Amino acid sequence: LCRGGLAERLCRLQNRERSAISFWRHQCISDAKIPSDKSGVLIVKILEMFEECTIQVAICQQLEQSPATLSSKDAVINAGEPILKVLFARETAAHLKSRPQDVIHIYPPWQKLILRNADVPVIMNTYFSLKVLPSEHSETREKTYGLTKMLIRKNIISLAETFRLDDVDDELHHQTSDHQVTCAPQIHNNCDSKKHPLAQSAVNDSLLEMVESQGAVGWREAQVRVVIQRVYCLPTREGYGSRVQGNKPLLSNRGMFCRLCLLVQDAYGMFSEVQLQPLNSADDVEQYCRRWEGKFCCLAGMKILQRTTRGRALGLFSLIDSLWPPVVPVKVPGQSQDSEMMTTNLAPPSFCYILTVQSGEIHVEVDEEEQISNLYQPPAVHGLKEILRMDGCNERCSFWAQVLYLRLQTKQSVPINQREICLFVTDSTLQNMVHMIPKVVAVSVAASCVLSTEITEALSVTSQFVFFKDALWGKGMIICVERTVLLLQKPLLYSAAGADLSELTGPVRLDELDSTTQANSICAVRGTVVGVNESTAFSWPTCDRCGNGKLELCPQDRGSLYCSQCSEVVISPVLKMQLEVFLSCSSRPQSTIKVKVWHEMSFGLFVLINMLLSLQSYEVQSVLGKEVGLLNCYVRSVTSHPNCIALEEIVLL
């Protein structure tokens, strides 16, 4: 809305009006009595009701005195008392749940409108209204209110008929005015209107209309039919699991405490995020994706958790933008819904309602047997080469790539269970390139990205092809954030957009160290050893089961080593040795190349002790001048003053 414009001022006025009405109703409920001030109160008794243009019209007779103070016999209406036509807005009518013979108190500021050539005055602005029951029948009627359905006549009047247009279709005149809709429709577990006669009126296709009509507290007596565009998990506050085991960086299950969520879209293109039940892990998200995405579902028993905007939820709206514009024309509010009036030239949504289920009640019915909706947009899969050439910022992208290496973020200021993990991936589009584009790219996995146990266990063992769905691309980086899903299999439905999704068959090649190498990347390096940093050379025994590098002497047998994490004696420890060497590389002749070299050897305990003793007499001269073949290395830092590159030898998955 334009700041200071008419629409913004009207919006503020509406908000103040809603607040005043809610506060007044809350006061009446908390005081458990009718307001004592009767000045200006209009007391009416409903004789007949019908609905027209979403407004509930009540033909009423005005009373001089409230029947709450009279017996039911004394409350009989005299024929001579004035007849009024009272208009109730949809929200007010839903609150009153009135029916014929009910007595309503209408408090100021109500207004009376006298129409020309009409004998019955119209009462408007009836937001401050209360229903009053005769004292001797109030308890009995309150108990029976929920047991019966009140049918209200709904007048369907076409605009063509109202304005007397010449091309009025005969069917419009033929429509009966006796359509019946329920004041209190029951929630059904199936959207099929053939099985449930009332479902046609109970099921809506507009999220916005449902929210406006049912309010923020939630709706129990109505359903809305939507299409599931995405299924994912969001972490809860307890959802950040440990990321290390021993001294090994692992992608452990960060979906330990998460919540299953749906991104749904209605027939008008409106989006909403539905937060369902909490899950112990994200292990089932893949089957939910396969079963639910693209299917219609009916939502009931929802309440509004939050109304969020683009500025407050950039991650959510980046996902919504990736699904906009719709692939098929959507309905336009306020226009005829004929196909020629539908359009896709619409601005992307600027707000979104976050919905959640009422306490302990799940009312999401997915019709898994129905065909995929035409409104569904499967993930558009691109090759990594194409993604790296995208010009946009904060764009969602999906790709199929092989994970070669993973590394835990080393920032000490960040708690270890909230650090990002870097996955180094490649695909056929990168491996087949010769120049200008790297053969391996880094994908940062944020702490908010929920991973399934299947993914974490697979990546901790071997190199895997992983489908990255709805990752975020921007500023030269690919990031897995909230609402990004990692799967070991391609989805059943996806749009390949001409991308080469074939798996790699030959050996994987890394970029060799050169002038374009950047920090936080991996590369292959070759050169000649020209120096050794003796102060950094050391070795230590580790557990052959969990990799724990802090072994202790066994309390029962001082000659044995003991692992506190496994709570067992280590029979065959693994000796790890680290040495920092300096290389001379022809690809970077002016740079100092410093490589931290690791080595692992498995020994029995006796051999291990002798090896540790022999390291005391280690000869540096034995490695100087040695030619180093292609070492796979992680680039820790690249500095220009001094011109130095710090590398660390790594082992690919």
Image (cartoon, rainbow, N blue to C red):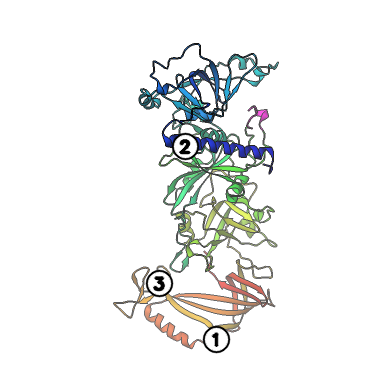
Q: Which residue is mark 2?
A: 26
- At x 58%, y 20%, the residue is 122
Between 463 and 411, the one lying in front of the other is: 411
Whole-angstrom CA distance, mark 3 to mark 2, is 66 Å
Q: Of tags 3 and 2, which is closer to the observer?
A: 2
- At x 64%, y 34%, the residue is 329
Q: Amino acid at mark 3?
A: Cys
Q: Which residue is mark 3?
A: 543
Between 354 and 268, the one lying in front of the other is: 354
Of callouts 3 and 2, the N-terminal one: 2
Q: Is residue 152 above or below residue 563?
A: above
- Percent x, y of residue 56: 54, 24
Magenta span covers which residues? 332-342
Between 212 and 136, the one lying in front of the other is: 136
Of callouts 2 and 1, the N-terminal one: 2
- Percent x, y of residue 604: 38, 77
Q: Amino acid at mark 2?
A: His
Q: Of tags 3 and 1, which is closer to the observer?
A: 3
Q: Amino acid at mark 1?
A: Val
Q: Which residue is mark 1?
A: 620
Determine whether the residue tagged by mark 2 lies in a helix, strand or loop: helix
Whole-angstrom CA distance, mark 2 to mark 1, is 84 Å
CB of mark 2 within 8 Å of CB of mark 1?
no
Residue 366 visible to an observer of this rendering: no
Of callouts 3 and 1, the N-terminal one: 3
- Percent x, y of residue 194: 48, 24
Q: Name which quarter of the figure residue 532 lies in.
A: bottom right
Q: Of tags 2 and 1, which is closer to the observer?
A: 2
Residue 4 visible to an observer of this rendering: yes
